[in-house]
């Protein structure tokens, strides 16, 4: 996974907290911020810029919300390996289920306490950065062998 995380967040306070928390725990990670869901697909489709390995996505934003972003990203096979983590203040179970059904990789509640907030973000980055992208590999038998048995 690349060391670029795209953060989609409309709250100034949360942007500052995320930047501070990840800057402390993972200073090597580059953060890029978008303030609404409307810019996510244009940014991901911009071949002139590095593609993030992870999108940290707020759920409730003006304009295009997080759930719509997940659906649009997952509708494009080009972004199959992209990790989408919802990071929200919503504890609504139905919203969490809708996000998973749409293709979110994880749904994480934003703690109010900064130390816990920082810990949750650090653990989230460690977890997803340690995982290989979802890539299907085709196994080809060596020459002279056939997969069909006689």
Image: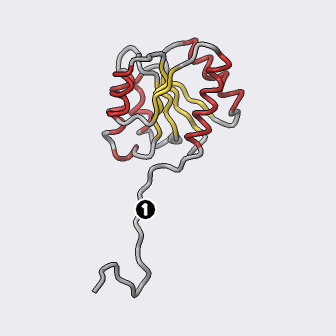
The residue at the point 48 percent across, 24 percent down is: 8
Q: Nearer the viewer, residue 140 or 51?
A: 140
Left or right for 128, reference 106: right
The residue at the point 30 percent across, 80 percent down is: 148
Q: Quadrant of the C terminus?
A: bottom left
Left or right for 33, reference 93: right
Would you identify the image quadrant in which residue 74 lies?
A: top left
Left or right for 121, reference 82: right
Count how many numbered circles sit on residues in the image. Answer: 1
Residue with the most extreme left position:
150
The residue at the point 45 percent across, 42 percent down is: 82
Q: Position of residue 53 (x, y in %)?
A: 52, 41
Secondary structure beneath disc 1?
Answer: loop
Would you identify the image quadrant in which residue 100 lies?
A: top left
Position of residue 132 relative to residue 45, above or below, is below
Q: How is the image coloured?
A: secondary structure
The residue at the point 46 percent across, 33 percent down is: 106
Residue marked by disc 1: 137
**How would you rate the neighbour count of disc 1 (Cα within 10 Å): few for under 14, some for 14-19, many for 20 or more?**
few
Q: Position of residue 59 (x, y in %)?
A: 42, 21
Q: Position of residue 30 (x, y in %)?
A: 62, 34
Q: Position of residue 54 (x, y in %)?
A: 51, 37
Position of residue 92 relative to residue 83, above or below, is above
Position of residue 25 relative to residue 150, above or below, is above
């Amino acid at each position: 996974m690349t060391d670029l995380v795209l953060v989609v967040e409309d709250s100034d306070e949360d942007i500052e907290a995320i930047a501070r928390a990840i800057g402390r725990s993972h200073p090597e990670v580059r953060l890029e911020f978008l303030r609404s869901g409307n810019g996510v697909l244009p940014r991901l489709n911009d071949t002139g810029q590095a593609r993030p390995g992870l999108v940290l996505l707020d759920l409730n934003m003006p304009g295009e919300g997080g759930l719509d972003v997940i659906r649009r990203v997952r509708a494009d096979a080009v972004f199959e390996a992209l990790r989408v983590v919802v990071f929200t203040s919503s504890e609504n179970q139905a919203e969490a289920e809708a996000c998973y059904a749409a293709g979110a990789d994880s749904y994480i509640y934003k703690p109010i306490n900064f130390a816990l907030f920082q810990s949750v973000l650090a653990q989230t980055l460690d977890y997803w950065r340690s995982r290989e992208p979802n890539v299907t590999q085709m196994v080809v038998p060596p020459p002279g062998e056939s997969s069909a048995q006689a």
